[in-house]
Image (cartoon, rainbow, N blue to C red):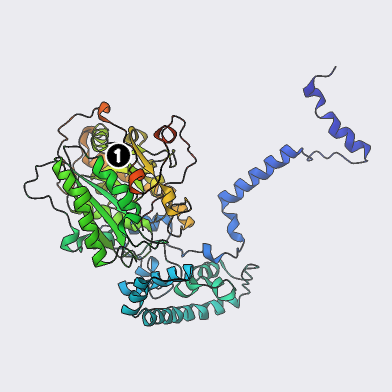
Amino acid sequence: MLEPQANLAAPVKERKEKVGGKVWPWQWTALETNFVLLIGIIILINLNLWNLLHYKHPSRRTFSVPHHEELSRMLHQESGRVADGISEDDIDYDGNLWTPIFDRNTIVCLNLDGEIKKTSWTTEEEKQTWADLNCGALLKAMFERWKLQSGHRKEECDRLATFGIIPGETWGDATPSQKKQWGDMACDCHYESGWNDMCLSGFPPHVHNTTVWRGIEEAAHSREGDERIVSPHGTPAMPIIAVTVGTTSRSFRWSKLDESPLFGILLPSIARTLEKGFEYRVYVGYDTGDLFYDNADRIAEANAWAKEHVETPAREKGHVVTVKFVSFLNILRKPGPMFNFLAACAFGDGADYVYRVNDDTELRTIWAGAFVTALANMQPANLGVVGPKCPEGNYRILTHDFVHRIHKDIFKVYYPVVLTDWWMDDWISRVYPMENTMRHEDVWVTHHTWVSGSGNPVRYHVDHSHKKFLEHELRHGYTLIEDYKRNRCAGGGTCKVTDGVVTLAWSEKYDADKIVYLDSVVKTRMGSSFEDSSSVYGEDDDMSGAYSQGGVSGV
């Protein structure tokens, strides 16, 4: 009897000989063929040969920016907004390929027009807003500007088309530079039936002057006095922790505060999880032109709510907490610039630590002492990132993050400015050394992604092309961290912060026994019975939950 291995190849050859076929040396089994095909695909991807094909997907097109090395040098330049030798047009395209909107009333009208088109109905309040702002005239003027810019691009696209370019079919005789120019100007838009508003306005660039380091710092510095936070008179000297959160009403038609997860979930959970020994500051950022938040009466109502439900109860328990609502002209309409702006506000006001969360995040345990102690015990002290356990998020990365102001000293902005959508949490989870990156198993949060209706928390268009910047920004981050450690962390000890701020030591010792799991506020605040804690926080957490930075529900 033959051994199984010795008999495997025989039937294949016998069958071919019976039908008169010839066995060639290069004829493979199905498994071998699939393996070779897989290797070929990997080689094509790594050589970036897919770009030889001209895909008919204008919605995927984004404007090119300088080479990654030039881009990084430009974005981290200290002397100005952009590096020497690189023009503003390389990152802005204002008046060329893209037409940003700076006017607050026009943004309101554009947002309102979008909501009406999606639902085909309006409220009386929306009708009044439309009339008060004269939205018809504002939008007409805006579309005329877009049409004019689009016409200039169309003329150049027609010239490029003479080289035989046919969208979705062939590049003709176009050179690589002409192909790039075609893509930069989104020329496909002018020759397709799927033409839309983006064909008029142009596609936003990866970064804008208002979103680079200098632009973010200028925006934070130019805040009104009532958008800044100073310690209340008589407050004892304590470490200052800033909680930063971006929020938006996009895709919702809220009429009351408690319809927003910010007031139904996050803020009540912050009030319940404070511990003594720290001063807390909560920065809530919203886009200029937001249909719900960008309203003087609404913000006054929100301030009154925060005082009644957060600040006053906290003060009665011996805690110091201040909540501020801050408007940001978010030109790119993305979460990344908002996060960087809020962190700049917090550090600019003197915060020692920043905790970046989402407006639909619920804090389920006390957290401040655990996080501060974790950072203090890192080598060097305070250089690194720590986050909570979040079963609903991607368990391979930190979906919420807590850093010391040393983070700003190293990177200048909280997240790399080119990572405006996803991949921000990938970056902060990987940029620090492994021993300086920690998920604190005693600190728990729940990410209520279901509040967005479909369960998908993403309330903005995601530009997937930004993923290509991740690895470069990580390499650049490694270099910045090592330079900082070498220059400011002598002997691996305490690092010296350039702005002279000295973080006060936490007066108590972290004790894991103090960590108490709290029932969800959702049961009483949002009128919903959420899962029992045993099902949410079992040992076998589901790692396939919503990708959390997509879950950044602000902006």
User: Toward which corner of the image does residue 529 lie, by quadrant?
Assistant: top left
Q: Is residue 184 visible?
A: yes
Q: Callout 1, which amino acid? A: Gly
Q: Quadrant of the N terminus?
A: top right
User: How far across and how far down the image is residue 471, in percent?
Assistant: 44, 47
The residue that label 1 is drawn on is: 384
User: How far across and how far down the image is residue 392, in percent?
Assistant: 43, 41
User: How far across and how far down the image is residue 451, in percent?
Assistant: 41, 51
Q: Residue at x 60, y 78 (%)?
A: 162
- Around disc 1, counting alpha carbons within 10 Å, would you say few (fewer than 14), some (14 to 19), or many (20 or more)? many
User: Toward which corner of the image does residue 100 lie, by quadrant?
Assistant: bottom left
Q: Quadrant of the C terminus?
A: bottom left
Q: How many marks?
A: 1
Q: Where 244 sits versus 105, above or below?
A: above
Q: Where 527 sits versus 432, above or below?
A: below
User: Toward which corner of the image does residue 138 lie, by quadrant?
Assistant: bottom left
- Badge 1 marks a residue whose secondary structure is loop
Q: Nearer the viewer, residue 123 or 117?
A: 123
- Residue 69 appears left or right of 192: left
Q: Nearer the viewer, residue 439 or 168?
A: 439
- Residue 398 appears left or right of 377: right
Q: Where 340 sits versus 133, above or below?
A: above
User: How far across and how far down the image is residue 77, in percent?
Assistant: 29, 57
Q: Nearer the viewer, residue 317 or 462?
A: 317
Q: Is residue 93 visible?
A: no
Question: Which residue is the extreme one toward the left?
Answer: 234
Q: Residue at x 68, y 45 (%)?
A: 37
- Residue 290 appears left or right of 4: left
- Residue 445 appears left or right of 57: left
